[in-house]
Amino acid sequence: MKKMKNKINYLFLVVLFTSFLGCSDLLEEVPVSDLSVENSFKTEADAKAAIIGVYNSLQLEGVYGKSQTLFSTDEHNAGSKVPLSGLNLYTFTADNVEVILPIWRDHYEGINRANLAISKIPGITMNVDERNTLVAEAKFIKALLYFNLIRYFGDVPYKYSETTSLNDLNIPRTPVATIYENMIRDLEYCVVNLNVKTAGLAGHATQDAAKTLLASVYLTRGSMANRDNTGNGIADFTLAKQYSKEVIDANRYSLCPYFPDAFIVQNKNNDEIVFDVQFKSPGLGVGNTIGLNMGIPSDASGIDNLSAGGSQGAIRANPYHQYYYDKADSVRLQWTDARIKIVSATGKFTRLSAVDKQTVSAAKFRRYPVRSPNFVLQTSDYDVNWPIFRYAEVLLIYAEALNETSGPTQPAIDALNQLRSRARNVNREGVHADVLPRSLTLQKSTGLADLTLSSPLVSSQTAFRNYIFYERSRELSAEGKRWFDLVRWGSLKTTLRNIINKMSSKALEAPVVQWPPLPGITQPPSTTTNTWKKYWIGNSDGKNGQTEEWNKITSNVQDFHMLLPIPNNERLANPSIGPNNPGYN
Amino acid sequence: MKFKLLTIIFLTFSISLFAQTTIEGVVNDAKGLPVPGANVIIKGTKNGVITDFDGVFKIKAKIGDVLIISSLGFDKKEVKIQGNSIKIVLGELNEALNEVVVIGYGSVKKKDLTGAVSSVRATSIEKGDPVDLQTAFSGRVAGLQITQNDNGLGSGVKAIIRGGSSLTSGNQPLYVIDGFPIIPDDNVSSNPLSDLDPGQIKSIEVLKDASATAIYGARGSNGVIIITTKLGKEGKPVITATVSSGTSFVSKFPRILTDLEYLDTQIIQDKINYLNGTTDNLSTYWQNLKDTNARGVDWAKEATQLASTRRMDLSMGGGSKEGLNYQISGSFLDQEGVVINTNFKRYNLNSNLVQSIGKNTKIGTNIKLAFSKNIGRSLDKDADGIFKKIFSTNPFQPINFQLGDIYIDPETNTGDNENVITYLKEVKNETQSTRIIGNLFYETKLVSNLTFYTSYGFNRGYINNQIFLPSTVLKGYRQNGIAEFEKIETINQVLETRLSYKKVIDKHNINATAVVEFSDNLRSIFTSGATGFSNQTNGFNNLSSATIATLPKNNIAKDNLMSFLGRVAYGYNNKYLLTASIRADGSSKFGKENKWGYFPSVALGWTLSEESFIKNMDIFDNFKLRASYGVTGNNQIPAYSSIGLFGAANYVFNDVFYSGIAQNNVSNPGLKWETTEQSNLGVDLGFFKNRLTITAEAYYKKTTDLLLEVQLPLSSGFETALKNIGSFSNKGFELTINSINIDNSNFKWKSDFTFSFNRNKVLDLGDKFEFYFNANIFPSKFMNEILIRVGQSTGIYYGFIEDQIINNQTEAANSPRQVGVGIPDINNNGQVKIYDVNGDGIINSNDKVQIANTNPDFIGGLNNEFTYKNFDISFFLRFSYGNDVINGNIGNLDKGGINNWNTLKSMSDYSYSAAYNPTGTFHGENGNGVYSSLFRSAYVEDGSFLKCDFITLGYAMPKSIVDNLKLNKFRLFARVNNPFMLTRYSWFDPEVNALGGTAGRVGGGVDLGSYPRSTSMTIGLSLNF
């Protein structure tokens, strides 16, 4: 018995001793399932995973995941049932947590990811060219995010490197001019080190994407110099022209022959896309809500609205926006401001009357298939890609920069005629079942005519500038460009205020929209002046008309709204940020 | 050889002289009542018997032998046999003082205790025969507040001792179950206590002050609850069987409008909406229904049921001196819920074995297995929770309506058109939990007074949550059925080695302990799911019919804790007591710079009743003063909190999915535990031969280096970081009174009373003055309801004060506009008016004021046990005063006019009462289809209560019957659980906490989709043989 007891004693002592060997190691933490900053950035695979994480920031809610196109412009506004704390009515404050806070937060999250990649990847042993390309991709995203930030907020803290500790986080605002310099330096690195476009690289930033972004950056800086009377911006417009022309001349992009094909989910990664945010569904966590917010409404209520393939119509096309289009420009009009709804029972479309109470959606990114037996509704998991730069915009940038430097010229007109020519193509192959049937082909006779130097639209630099102002909206509507355009031209307030005047005058006369005959579609009822009036002005008590909301928007919007307020959360946590933008507490 | 011979001679001699005869005896107590079940052993042998029901025993012994008589609750007595029959009178043990109290890494006699420790004994718990352990000690320990998730089956609780010590980090105590330390998950529904069989608990000790808890170092600051299970005693095997069966029903339903009241309201309300010019006049529809005497559905009645509960416990225990002591048990619980299709089953198997090897060595093992299956547990506890919808559903929807039917008839639609009965019947929601807690120990006396003890134990928990939402319910409708899976696995291992030294030299009493302990914890979570089911018949069991998979995710966290600790207790002359302890803890969870923490404590006790000047007063049987001070820590933060961890951040290139990474948090190498300093003053008093004992404690706790989620400048790329910042205090008072009021031969009345209050205060929040938190009552609408602010307590809710209803357009025009607070600045008929606190004519966040405090002013409990002859009656009362409850359930029920939701009767009455609403405007949606989405005083209710937890009536069968059945004991009992509750709270139960995480700690007291409280009647019998 005694022996056994001793044995047991020894056994326990041995167990005890071995278990305490290497005590100090036991308290070191090595994560089991996740990587950490300390144990990552050692291999090429680590570098690539980090770059995927940098791209992922484009999908964040406040970057391009959800909050784009929510600011009211002449194109569209968020419906009044989606008030988003005053976002639609220009009563938002620095307290806005629905949209403005996510924009700030998520852009900086992406910037930090990019900074981490930029500082850590060069230390990894791998092919130098590939390594430089990865660093360039991070720099491209960082530049894109800062380009958004300075256009939203003006001077913002510029982060040269990633956050490594909890100390020294209070960073003051950096002047926009400095940020421009850093962005341009990063993008010049990108132009050299990014890959050249190939089919397999879809979704990656390329040399052409960097050049397009540079052109857009120079165009914006030039416009803003004009706006603020701080210069004529000619140097910037020249560079914008140069970079956009390089993209055009490289001849790696082309417009989709049929306008809707540039957007539909079946035609992802087409030759018109210079750079976009890529999504995929379902069930992977890399989808978006674009189809939920923008799309075609249906006549069903409640859940069947969405099940029928419809959207919540949160982003509505303004009724006035349709007047931007020539009556021959019906393909772009009807694809963009879709005056149609889905009949839930049949899954087919019917056209809204011109003054239907139903929401007119900004339906450029409508969902497919509608009401098919295989349709599985994923409300927040739609996989249409979100374009950041289409080739169409490269042409627009080129034309605008050229006009700013040299006035109306044939090359600028030629560039824009490509867009007009494409808008004439209707239903090229009869593929899609939509309100735009494809049995028709090129409508040369009834479609948009090409511009010529003798056209009054191009009669002067100012007239041409005005044409481009509207052409950008016709071509790029609902792509998150308009608010930035109105801001860089300095015409946010005037444009919005003009709408109410124009709409009210329209209320006195019958609307001018003419619907081209389309087979198989119920024709809209004719609209009388009275029904239009009722639609616009509302009941006898002035309620429930469109004017009620637009009166608010136009009386609220001010010049200071060309910058957003810095969110209170940042100001509370970072005393160095200083006072808010003018107009906000 | 000589000796052998001598032995034989002696033996022969003794046989002739002291031949063994049968000695018959009776054991009585001081009052002459028989003491059944007493152990009678002949000293120096293993021969022993147990007294029968009449206290009678027969034993073969010799004249001159010494009998040792012992029985629980009595002083041990040694009696020399002088004749063939013997009468023994046992003196009642000075229970309060000689009781052994389990403390950290040892035990101590209550009289030697210097810390604040409360004990709950099995005998007291068993009276209520609770189905779960968690509620068993609620109200029985002063200073312990039990907050339950809700009344759902197998629902978890949170135990908060002395208000907790942390503001935003974990606030739950450390549980030590048979020596095995477990910190429960923050997720209150997976509490290890839910897996224990309450019938097998011997005692629960609650360690409250730093003198008691500092020995647990970095895990001790929230207090410690030590649970000890039963072990068989020396003697014949004792088999106990308890069987009971009961029926439960919903105690109380919230008062909503009946179908007929609803019709009347709809008729009136529609007219008002019509006046606002917003809806088509539907009142003819409702009028027609009324005219045809149509009756609606009572959804609450349809969704609930009379539920049955069955329970069976079987155990066997026994042992022999220097042999094997054992206790094995099994139990089964089958509990139906009062909501249809909810059910809880639990199976337990326990074995507790201790083998003595020689006089000085023991080896033992203790294994507890538990398996439970809970159907319907995780029914959504959120703003759209199913138990809310039961009440808001339009009574005039047909009972069998389906999703998608309703838009055809807009008159009868309700909100989102979920049929709650379909939901309850067709959603498959199952949680299975398996847990094994096992340990093995070895104990030996190395030399006299010095004992070596070592043990290895592990705790393995496995929880499997599965849910299937078919396309007949809203969530599954859009996606053709959704299956979700969550598997949580925890493995904790602890290796402990202990040396303890006990010595009495003269008047000096020394008790020292030194321990080395190492533990590692692994926790792994795996989630996955699938949608698009082509065949939904078998739900989540038929994944092969799913068409779309949700990307699976896992998360594994591992941490280690290494500790060295020591304690010395010294007593002089039974008067002066000193206890000092220190623990060093190294935790992997903390930053590189702060891996090790040191936690000392010291306590003094002075037993005045041993002093002659007090003895001479002849008032006090016990009078002890205690004072303690110590430092404890809290390491309840997730593993890897101090390092910059990456999370998944995936992307798509060319329509191909790629997985990537992004940094989730900034590394913080300085991160460490929270430190709590606690001072405690206590007094123990005993009067009337300790029939009346009083313990009073006062304490002050200050926690510094709080682990706060600090908001970072967002420009850093991060939102928050865990930092050691700020301080927080708790102070309070606790009173425990135990009294034997009446003690006659036939009638006995015993009472236990506890009372306590705690006040906490935020002292410092670093460079901030205040922090806001979201309670997530209505995530899209209410924000920042909870406020912690320097100088104030926790549990404070900030919101708007609800004024009267806007009655007409003039009033609408003159009412303050609501700007920048989440809704369009429009006032209209029927809308709630908000009180303009600062009188500036607009309602904005400056008009928010404190509208609720969820901390009670005081809490307590009163237990009463009566025994009259063979009958026993006991009941238990519990109370809480001064706490507010945020009733998030009324969210849809307070706004008639939207989606034909039903309305609370009180809200309807209020809408029409002349004082608030002279023109009878209905309280509801305003003319622009918008309802006030502000968090306001209407959601706050008084949560004070007085509850009776149970009334039990027992009858012990008389001896004649018991003997005939060859039993030791045969007791019949009948019990009512939750017979009554006095409260002004309108919903099921004011004791509720739907909030988890930080919001639950800094706010708490929110009722959201809670499960109904039930009253149950149980009968059963308990056999002992």
Image: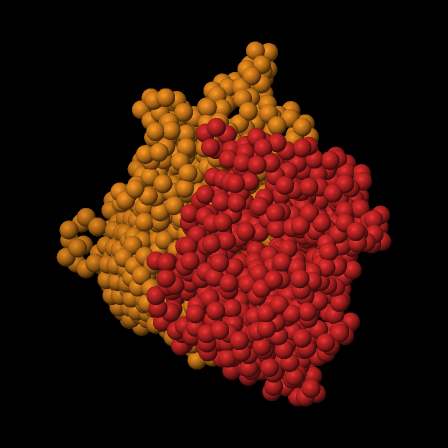
Q: Is residue B982 visible?
A: yes
Quadrant where the image shows the C terminus of chain B: top right
Residue at image position (29%, 54%) is B792
Residue A193 placement: quadrant: bottom right
Residue at image position (29%, 66%) is B629
Q: On the rendered structure, is A323 left or right of B598?
A: right
**The hue in which chain B appears in the rendered picture of the protein:** orange
Q: Position of residue B278 (x, y in %)?
A: 51, 29
Q: On the rendered structure, is A326 left or right of A532?
A: right
Residue at image position (79%, 51%) is A445
Q: Is residue B429 visible?
A: no
Q: How is the image coloured?
A: by chain
Q: How many marks?
A: 0
Up-down relation of residue A91 to residue A239 (above or below): above
Q: Position of residue A176 (x, y in %)?
A: 45, 73
Q: Residue furthest front?
A: A454
Q: On the rendered structure, is A80 left or right of B812?
A: right
Say which of B60 and A281 sits in front.
Answer: A281
Say which of A128 and B4 sits in front.
Answer: A128
Which chain is in red here? A
Quadrant where the image shows the N terminus of chain B: bottom right
Up-down relation of residue B64 to residue B691 (above or below): below
Residue at image position (68%, 41%) is A514
Up-down relation of residue A376 to residue B5 (above or below): above
Q: Position of residue B124 (x, y in %)?
A: 43, 44
Say which of B910 and A518 sits in front.
Answer: A518
Q: Position of residue B729 (x, y in %)?
A: 30, 60
